[in-house]
Image (cartoon, rainbow, N blue to C red):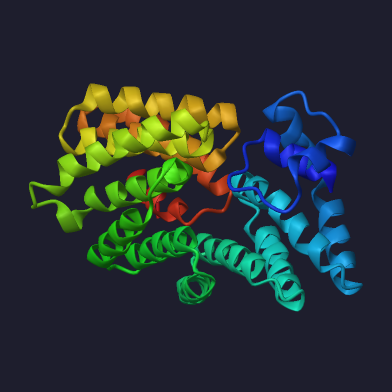
Amino acid sequence: MASGYAAATTIGTPNLTGVARAQAAESARVFEDYDDALTWFDEERHNLAAVQQAAAEVGLHQHVWQLAEAQKHFFVVRRHIDDFLAAQQLALTAARADGDRETEALMLSSLGGVYWMAGRLDESEDCCLQVRHLYRALGDVEGEATALIAHGVVLNHRGHPERCVDFTTQALDLLDGPHTLQLRAKALMNRAVVYKSDAYKSEPGPRPQGIADLREALTIFRQVGDRHSEAFAPGNLADFHLLDTDLDAALDLYREQQALARELADVYIEAEALRGSGDAHAAAHRAAQARQAWTEALALYEQIDHPKVTETRKRLGEQ
């Protein structure tokens, strides 16, 4: 357990809870760097799943959800969606069996995120509603804001961008104080993503607001050391430059995003950067460079079995 939390800390797992850092440090393996910790998770992945299942079978509830908590960011980086789902389902059952409503809300929130990643939007939205209800009952305003942000993301993917903006803005109104900075930055970036969509293309106000939101979010991510979230921001800024046909600026930002993604060994973010680079080259009538970037993006999307495989094949003229 201690080594798992040490590895999770080393790869920058956000909002890590469950084991005090001092307790984890007492018996944990020391990891040299990000790559060392990520490799440890790769090697121990199946062992950790077996240990969690065994703990669930004998009723070691706290160990069950702690094991899920330690692995959550690893699952996102490596896109192990099935493993993530199985771990979070066990974790939620354990938290409920333990009667720990605060942990139940945390595990339910993570489960909703996995359902969203898997495209299971009905189940994801149901989790968001349950989480918000739990946090309201607990009087946890920051937790309620977290639920609103997550629900907004689901609503956007269901084709309701205006409701997404409304929920995200409600969340921002609830977030106050330096301890909420990281969550505030994520909300700002989520709202900006909606503002660059077709739903707001004809409106003059949202686009500059989206750029301002992203710049503020990027500053915060760098301030708090959230490198994974930071890696999304340049690509989103690049998308705005692409919409404004400022193609050189867009390409520079996509390249910055790709470099960050490679440092983090995050295949999905790198694929997104390459997809964007291809779009920018295509807009500049550089067909060969566009095709090369899209081909590389397709290979990465295929590696993680991502739904954007179909979209990227269409860019390449494949069926």
Closer to us: 316 or 258: 258
- Asked if 23 appears above or below 161 in the picture, the reply is above
Q: Can residue 43 be seen by looking at this rendering?
A: no
Quadrant (top left, top right, bottom left, bottom right) of the C terminus = bottom left
> Residue at the spot x=87%, y=73% of the render?
59
179 shown above or below 168: above
- On the image, the x and y values in percent for residue 246 come to 18, 27
| Position of residue 88 measured from the top left corner of the image (x, y, whole percent) | 68, 65
Residue 141, quarter of picture: bottom left
Q: Position of residue 295 (x, y in %)?
A: 45, 37
Residue under the point 60% across and 33% down: 265
Tell me: 296 left or right of 167: right
Residue occupying image coordinates x 55% and y 48%:
302
Q: Nearer the viewer, residue 32 or 41?
A: 32
* Image-based side of 4 in relation to 283, left or right: right
For the point 42% across and 60% down, the residue is 145
Query: Image check: 265 left or right of 195?
Result: right
- Residue 21 left/right relative to 105: right
Q: Work out whether 39 lies above or below 136.
A: above
Q: Position of residue 161 (x, y in %)?
A: 26, 62
Residue 315, by quadrant, is top left
Residue 26 can be seen in this image: yes
> Which quadrant of the figure has residue 39?
top right
